[in-house]
Amino acid sequence: PLHWECVGGHLGPGEAYAEAAVREVEEELGVVPVRLERLGKVRACEVTGWEFLEIYRATLRKNAVPQPAPAEVIATEWMTPAELRAEVLAGAWPFSPTFLHSLETVGKKIWGE
């Protein structure tokens, strides 16, 4: 709570990671992604609450207007990958530990390295 985080959630019974990713984007942001790109998987560990994570980049329609669910999202902020990287490195935002840990795994794919 009260940390900057990416869209996320738990798998439903028999649900694949990609299916859950689409569902969570729709539930939290009110839009359906037109494409998902799998960036990687994070092993279960203490910082993830002993949960496995699969990380995706979602692409939205060009004119899609997110309608964040008030019960799920307090605020949104759009950043380019370069802007996000600068903010993470500066430590200026209260990013969740799980989000920062995930970036250690998939950051190079996000930053374009």
Image: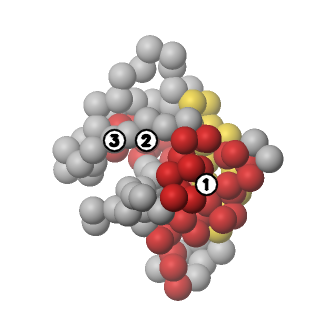
Label pair 3/1, CB-CB below 8 angstroms = no
* Residue at x 23% of width, y 48% of height: 74
Total numbered circles: 3
Which colouring convention does the figure follow?
secondary structure
- Residue identifier under label 2: 25
Residue 55's disc is 1
Q: Residue furthest top?
A: 63
Instruction: Please name the amino acid that badge 1 sits on.
Output: Ile
Left or right side of 70 for 9: right
Disc 2 from disc 3: Cα separation:
13 Å
Q: Position of residue 34 (x, y in %)?
A: 56, 26
Q: Residues within 10 Å of mark 2 (few under 14, many from 20)?
A: many
* Residue at x 61% of width, y 60% of height: 103
Left or right side of 68 for 54: right
Which of the two labelled residues, at mark 3 and mark 1, occupies the earlier sequence position? Answer: 1
Determine whether the residue tagged by mark 3 lies in a helix, strand or loop. loop
Q: Residues within 10 Å of mark 1 (few under 14, many from 20)?
A: many
Disc 3 from disc 1: Cα separation:
19 Å
Q: Judge by depth and name the residue closer to the eye, 17 or 70.
A: 70
- Residue identifier under label 3: 76
Instruction: Please name the amino acid that badge 3 sits on.
Output: Thr
From this view, report whether residue 83 is shown above or below residue 102: above
Instruction: Please name the amino acid that badge 2 sits on.
Output: Val
* Residue at x 38% of width, y 40% of height: 77
Which of the two labelled residues, at mark 2 and mark 1, occupies the earlier sequence position? Answer: 2
Q: Residues within 10 Å of mark 3 (few under 14, many from 20)?
A: few
